[in-house]
Amino acid sequence: MERMDIVEEAQQPAPPVTFTGRKTLVAAAVAVVLIAGALLIRPARAGDDARPPGPTERAASAVGMGAPVAAVDLTALVSDREKWLAKHADDEASWAVLGAAYLEQARRTADSGWYPKAEKALKRSLELRPAEKGNFDAMTGMGGLANARRDFGTAKKWGELVRAQAPQRWTAYPVLVDAYSGLGDYKGAQTAMERLLELRPGLAAYVRASQVYRDRGWREDAAVAMEQAAAAAKAPAEKAYALFRLGELSWERGETEAALGYYEGALRADPAQAQALGGRARALAALGRGGEAVRDYRLALGRAPVPQVARELGELLESLGRGEEARAAYDMLNGLAARDGTNGVDDDVVLGLYEADHGDPAAAVRRLSEEWTRHKSVQVADALGWALYKAGAAEEALEYAKKATETGLRNAEFAYHRAMIERGLGDDAATRRYLQEALRTNPSFSPLRSPLAKEALSAIAEPPAGGPENLLPTKPWVAPDLPKPVAKPKPASQPKPKPSPSPSPSTR
């Protein structure tokens, strides 16, 4: 019965369309046309939308993750946020994004002039929304900026502030790993890295894990972690950075051919990767291809002028007997360090090493002693120890050389410095040990100092065969005559006690 009623109702004629009904139908038709047109003109960004993100979106996502960004995408992001903020100056989130983009520009171009711009943008974001109200993006950006300037104490404060307010916010932990490492707190860095891996395994976490493992001397673990970073990379710029870091690990192990392959892979992924150009120059120099190495160093300095790369170029030119060109490279180093200093960047380690080897060792000691009060890392300890040795204070230098070489990190330059300090103190055994360690770790660690290490090792006589005399007997060993044991006499047997007599009846 129910189905029959439905059929009969369906067969009845439809009611006439009134004027009001016609208006409703027309309005519905117009709405359908407008919605369809809107979908054709601007498709919705739903999960099934196949349209890839544009340059601005890609760059904003990457800087938010602390990942490297392609130069074109980064330029687009900076331009987009600057235009937006010109009309919406109270958007604290956009100020934080712009500050992070400026910071990435500084990393890509090695132009420290971007740092004051980043600081201004991040501080503006914090003015609009203070740290007390949880402006975590700007706070993390300030920590990253401080790390980039090598102001690790300030970076630690920002990172710990974010962690205190939001312990589950993963972006605080890359800042803390870098800050603790720069301060020489390697256990703290490892703890922060492990927490980062728990919260957000990915490119940023694997890069920091590799860094921590390398600092602890766990070279195989460092390489595996960086391979995981390369596998997690999604964009060419990210892949290029991971390959560059793999090249650095191979270089430190003395695997020059493998390092060269990684550097070239990085340049294929991102031809604008200036760090990989500098790495390839270093590897080419070690392989005896000095002309190509000079070319790559100059290309790297043209794209991203870094004081350390200028120092390496100067030393390569000096080793090739091109002294005038070497002096020009050293002048560039000083100019770049002066530029960085005006923008709040700490270049004291590279400057101190340069002054110790090519300038005024006493000035290097003063500079690096001040640096040691701020940052007690192995890099500062090694540089200060070397400066003290070059200034004639070998005994004091040894204390810092020990700090640099006894933490687990295997570094050929550190071992060479320790060897020369031990030689200055007259300890041939320790000199031999650390020279061998330096050349075993990387036989081509420096175009200037590697040949000196080989000469010093050949000049030290090998120890006499068989070891020191005081450890070996001068005559064959003969078993001594030992006294025979004397049997102990058995103790005399004691008479058994007699039982006491029973009391007599009279005494009961």
Image (spheres, helix red, strand yellow):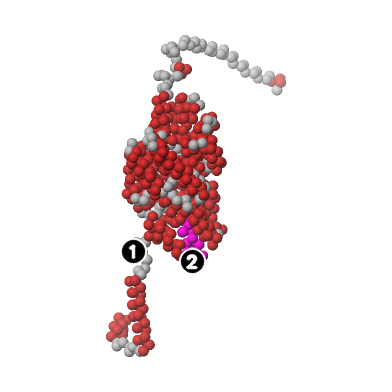
Query: In terms of secondary structure, what is the magenta stretch mainly?
Result: helix
Kindly report the distance in space between the C-alpha atoms of the residues bearing marks 2 and 1: 28 Å
Q: Is residue 290 magenta?
A: no
Of discs 2 and 1, which sits in the foreground? 2
Say which residue label 2 marks: 88
Amino acid, disc 1: Arg
| Helix, strand or loop for disc 2 | loop
Q: Which residues are magenta?
A: 85-100
**What residue is shown at x 62% (from left), y 16% (from top)?**
498
Asked if one can make out residue 442 in the rendered structure from this viewpoint, the answer is no
Give coordinates of residue 494: x percent, y percent. 58, 14
Q: Is residue 116 visible?
A: yes
Q: Which mark is residue 342?
A: none
Question: 276 or 112, which is in the foreground?
Answer: 112
Residue for point 47% across, 38% down: 354
Which of marks 1 and 2 precedes in the sequence?
A: 1
Amino acid type, label 2: His
Q: Nearer the viewer, residue 213 or 70?
A: 70
Relative to 42, residue 408 above or below:
above
Circle 1 SS class: loop
Q: Residues within 10 Å of mark 2 (few under 14, many from 20)?
A: few
Pick the residue in front: 503 or 276. Answer: 276
Identify the residue at horizontal 45%, vertical 15% (top origin): 473
Tag 1 residue? 51
* Quadrant housing the C terminus: top right
**Relative image position of residue 418 (x, y in whole percent):** 47, 32
Which quarter of the rendering shows the N terminus? Answer: bottom left
Question: Which residue is found at the position 42% from the left and 42% from the top?
Answer: 329
Residues packed near mark 1 inside 10 Å, few (<14), some (14 to 19) or many (20 plus)? few
Q: Are marks 2 and 1 in contact (CB under 8 Å)?
A: no
> Is 50 displayed left or right of 376 in the figure?
left
Q: Is residue 417 above or below residue 19?
A: above
